[in-house]
């Protein structure tokens, strides 16, 4: 738009300046011709008009306005010219000019009149296209220039936009990397501090057998937490690096049953019922990534549920989309937090998450896995009523 407006304004300014310049040049030319022809008419008289050969119209007019001779028409058929502006000015000042437009306003005629020594008025005229006519004649080349300018601007703006977006993406990635490093350091620092403290107390050798057992259990739990965290970080790193995996046909129903069976001991401990419904539908993807996605969704559905609650996996097909839905009857997610739950290390209920050993990376792995498979994620949740997360895989 800026390029187009600039081009139009520039064209109009240039046309106006050039038009003004050529008009002044035309008047100077008419003045020179009028002086030369006037001298010839004074020497040869009206007979000069019999031999003159010119494309411009030349008229000889008596002081009373009567047309004595004209190169473009029969002088006897022409009306009196005493009321013409250029004639009046010539009679008063010796010289006069005027401009008159045609009926269609596509042309204008410039008149220049000079009073001769014998009192007669010699008038020379020339036709000139108006600015509108010139612009109409230049529509095609102007259109080509406008098209070129728009295309050039589009290419330039696209490159600039890409550069800006690349910079923004680079800054965003750098910011995310910095936040990720900071979060990882924080998450590792807590269990390491605990392990160091327990190990120091054991090293002193003052603890009894029961205390040693408690400390050992705590060290084991914190170590397992660290192992889980490192494993999740490695999974996200693989997806971040866009590593190439071998795709295969994955039966989502069978995979869901396998994962549910694996999580059954945890579900029994939490008193949560497990269920898989829907159809046996296969999609072409990376089994390892889809397994991690579904495992984390089901694991969350159990961990954040209530006693006697339900964790359910549904597999359906809708048009060209395969829907993988994980539903629970747990604590739910507040509306304002639903967009943030897929961020790394973001926890809805921090105290509950730490109590159950969550790393805060589960849903981030789900998000990265969905992006890898060009799938979208929909979340429906209500506080204290449960959560429904659907991954929409493209059929092909």
Image (tube, rainbow, N blue to C red):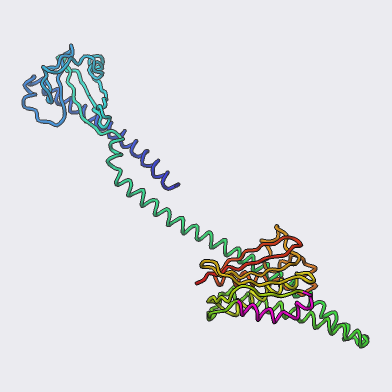
Q: Is residue 265 magenta?
A: yes
Residue pictured at 31% horizontal, 35% vertical: 132
- Front position in the image: 334 or 144: 334
Specify whether 16 is left or right of 382.
left
| Image location of residue 60, percent across then percent down | 14, 19
Foreground pick, 63 / 188: 188
**Residue at the top extreme, as displayed:** 64
Compare residues 180 and 63 and report the one nearer the observer.
Answer: 180
Q: Residue at x 26, y 25 (%)?
A: 100
Magenta residue span: 253-271
Compared to residue 287, the image places residue 333 above or below, namely above
Q: Is residue 130 left or right of residue 359?
A: left
29 versus 368 height, above or below: above
Rendered position, 120 above or below 161: above
At x 20%, y 20%, the residue is 114
Q: Please tell me in which quadrant of the rendered image residue 139 appears.
A: top left
Q: Does residue 189 appear in the picture of this structure?
A: no
227 part of magenta stretch: no
Residue 40 placement, left or right of 287:
left
């Amino acid at each position: 738009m800026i390029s187009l407006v600039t081009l139009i304004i520039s064209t109009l300014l240039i046309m106006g300046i050039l038009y003004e310049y050529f008009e002044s040049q035309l008047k100077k030319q008419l003045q020179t011709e009028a002086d030369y022809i006037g001298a010839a008419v004074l020497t040869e008289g009206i007979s000069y008009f019999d031999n003159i050969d010119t494309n411009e119209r030349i008229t000889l007019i008596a002081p009373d306005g009567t047309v004595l001779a004209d190169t473009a028409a029969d002088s006897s058929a022409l009306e009196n010219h005493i009321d013409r502006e250029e004639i009046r000015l010539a009679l008063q000042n010796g010289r006069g000019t005027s401009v008159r437009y045609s009926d269609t306003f596509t042309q204008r005629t410039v008149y220049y009149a000079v009073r001769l020594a014998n009192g007669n008025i010699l008038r020379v005229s020339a036709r000139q296209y108006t600015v509108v006519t010139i612009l109409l004649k230049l529509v095609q080349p102007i259109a080509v220039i406008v098209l070129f300018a728009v295309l050039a601007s589009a290419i330039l703006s696209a490159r600039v936009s890409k550069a800006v977006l690349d910079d923004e993406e680079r800054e965003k990635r750098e910011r995310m990397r910095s936040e990720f490093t900071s979060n990882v350091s924080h998450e590792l620092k807590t269990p390491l501090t605990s392990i160091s403290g327990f190990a120091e107390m054991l090293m002193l050798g003052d603890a009894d057998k029961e205390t040693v057992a408690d400390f050992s259990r705590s060290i084991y739990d914190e170590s397992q937490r660290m192992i889980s965290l490192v494993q999740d970080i490695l999974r996200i790193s693989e997806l971040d690096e866009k590593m190439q995996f071998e795709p295969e046909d994955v039966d989502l129903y069978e995979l869901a049953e396998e994962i549910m069976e694996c999580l059954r001991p945890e579900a029994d401990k939490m008193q949560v019922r497990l269920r898989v419904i829907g159809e046996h539908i296969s999609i072409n993807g990376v089994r390892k990534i889809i397994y991690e996605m579904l495992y984390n969704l089901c694991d969350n559905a159990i961990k954040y549920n209530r006693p006697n609650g339900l964790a359910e996996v549904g597999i359906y097909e809708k048009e060209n989309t395969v829907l993988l839905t994980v539903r629970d009857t747990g604590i739910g997610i507040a509306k304002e937090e639903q967009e943030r739950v897929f961020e790394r290390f973001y926890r809805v209920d921090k105290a509950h998450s730490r109590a159950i050993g969550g790393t805060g990376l589960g849903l981030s792995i789900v998000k990265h896995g969905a992006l890898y498979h060009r799938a979208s994620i929909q979340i429906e949740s209500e506080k204290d009523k449960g959560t429904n997360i659907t991954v929409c895989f493209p059929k092909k």
